Image (cartoon, grey):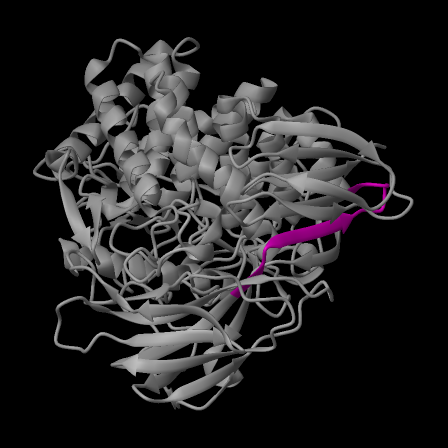
Amino acid sequence: MTSTLRTRRTTAALAALALVAGGAAVAAPASAAPGTPAAGSPPGALTNTAHLDFLLDEVSPAAVEGHSSYRLDADPSLTLPWTYADARDAGTFERVGGGPLDPATGDYGQGAFNSDDVSRAAVVYLRHWQQTGDEASREKAYEVLRALAYFQTTTGADTGNVVLWMQPDGELNPSAEPVELPDPSDSEESYWLARSLWALGEGYAAFRDSDPAFAAFLQQRLQLGVAAVDREVLDRYGEYEQADGVEVPAWLIVNGADATAEAVLGLSAYVEAAPGDEAVRDSTAKLAEGVAAYAGITAGASGEAARGSGGAGSSGDAAQSWPYGAALPWAESRSMWHAWSSQMAGALARASVALDDESLRAPAIVESAQFAPTLLTAGGPDNGWYPSPTERVQIAYGADSRVQNLLATADAAGLPGLADLAGVQAAWFFGLNPAAEPMYDPATGVTYDGIQPDGSINRNSGAESTIHGLLSMLALDAHPDVAALATSLTTLEARDGLTVVEAETAGSGGTVGTPESSWTGESSWSGSYLAVAKGQTASLALPAPASGQAADRIVEPVLWQVEKGGTTPTPKSQWKAGNKPLGTVKAEVGPQGITAVPGALLPVALDRLVPAGTSALTVRGIGGETKIDALLVRPTVSSLRASGANGGSAALVQNSLASAQDAVVGSAGSAQTLSVYDGSGALVATQSIDGPTTVRLPAAGFALALATD
């Protein structure tokens, strides 16, 4: 099973990139263009389901043992969204499937429809109906949930699991090409099982009172899915595995906190609506406990085996060293974070309310108050930090996950500063992004498929992008003040945050090497590396500060760290800035355990800050061979400034140290309200400013200055 899950994670990461590049979609026979925008939202609302409505189609599947749905005998048609939509002329789109199309059969290598998108489309229609009372969305929610139920296997050893793909004629495709694992797709726990629980849970809560018979059907299907999780995942509840020297919970769906979190979203909604279902409540609590346990382990835990003593890297403060307070997604990697499906914080916040367990909020608050500002000032919701920001494609799934986390945590914990951060993050959809163009159009409901690292936009608009754009719009419509902030920020004025220095291009001395594969099995080299053998010295140039002002900086070398006690000699190196020692690094991690390979590619927190004015670091090998992938360079105070055409403006500053420090916020002639927050997101002070103002930032805290207009 472990090998299967590793391959699935790799496939998922690569598939996300292929999706944005448009390489996974092959055109089907021509489909109609989107019609008139939907009228279900109130005037002024951002949510427009027109494009998602266009993606919907109907199929009437043949009878298949183990697959059925609600009232299928009486109503044999199922409604569900096509997976992809390729841009055509004059703003039109063509619905397409995944994988190569066989002209003779009309089948795709994968299929036309997938249960991941069916689940999330149901969530969109459910939330839209619940927020607006729109009857058309109620009907679509009902129909799409009926389609989702058909994907679930109801007989045999795999009862409760879910098939991923369906062909255009309604035929299920359990073994797609390229292969998705598990194979067959309903043979083990999966992302699509987790997302089905998300939709079934929210569906039960929505229909419980208005249609008790349908709600009872959804409840029965949810209980089947939970039973599958109980036997395939929670049979290991309370057990821990080793992952490169860190103990990680063994009871996460596909070993993923990300997949588990999306199940917890739906299960939390269900638990609130069905408080008497003690069995599901117990399973929900165990899954949430696993997500919280892993989040608590990983936030700031990356470098403990290699970290020296004292100084910048030893405080243990989450904001100060990689992953900067982020909840990591995969128990089989200590060196991977991705924005897509990163809803761990939001799920924990919602579970804390549903289960009346405030302890679940702690890691959610850390991620929201400390990692979210780090990500914003670094450039936004990158697809992947592995551990360097190597996959800088940005998609709606990632942007929406960040918005959902911040709003859920703000609501659950009563921390309005996190809602303001959500407004800055949600501005991604309106132009505050690497393309400097809107990614969502309220007039059509179209969300583009992504932004490439060069800033170009993939103007296709498939189901996943459309769904997550709409989920963010629904969240903004439910938080009007946050929506006003998000739509007022369209232009990036300045940004000074985490940057990457490639060791092989910045260095002199040592030897440049190229890994056999960039993918290590659990993370990714950002390119080549610089190898420094025992007795060698190399120099690595640092970029000038983005702010133009000399200040101390935090530098974390990303090193290949070998397994302690293994056959490879432990790399040891000494780091200096001029004549000032920064620390001695012993690059090793603990036992491999469930990870793909012994050793890990991880950043190391040096003992001391790099002094202001330093233009290069030197590293001397004193043992083994030190392989340097890159340097992660951050100012001690990161910052972002943005504005908009309607007088909107925002300035964000974040303290990355475990001690208070001063920062300057504001622009000349700009009237703003300045709010200061500590490292837990609690408000410390607020004042009106009309120009550059010096503010004292608490340890790991942040401040936001927002236009008062």
Task: Give the image location of residue 238, x and y in percent.
Answer: 15, 34
| Image quadrant occupied by the C terminus | top right
- Residue 79 visible to an observer of this rendering: no
Task: Give the image location of residue 458, x and y in percent.
Answer: 59, 62
Which residue is painted at 43% across and 74% down in the image?
A: 575
Task: Give the image location of residue 410, x and y in percent.
Answer: 54, 28
29 or 697, which is in the foreground?
697
Vertical relation: 416 (above or below) 79: above
Vertical relation: 544 (above or below) 693: below
Main SS class of the magenta portion in the image: strand
Vertical relation: 659 (above or below) 551: above
Q: In this image, 70 relative to 540: left or right? A: left
Specify the quadrant of the image occupied by residue 253: top left
Q: In this image, 173 relative to 511: left or right? A: left
For this orientation, the residue located farthest to the right is: 669
Q: In this image, 392 relative to 46: left or right? A: left
For this orientation, the residue located farthest to the left is: 157
Which residue is painted at 58% across and 17% down in the image?
A: 133
Specify the quadrant of the image occupied by residue 536: bottom left
Magenta extent: 633-649
For this orientation, the residue located farthest to the front is: 579
Q: In this image, 475 relative to 569: left or right? A: right
Which residue is painted at 53% across and 35% down in the image?
A: 406
Task: Give the image location of residue 174, x and y in percent.
Answer: 22, 51
* The magenta stretch spans residue 645: yes
575 or 438, which is in the foreground?
575
* Number of numbered callouts drawn: 0
* The magenta stretch spans residue 397: no
- Residue 412 visible to an observer of this rendering: yes
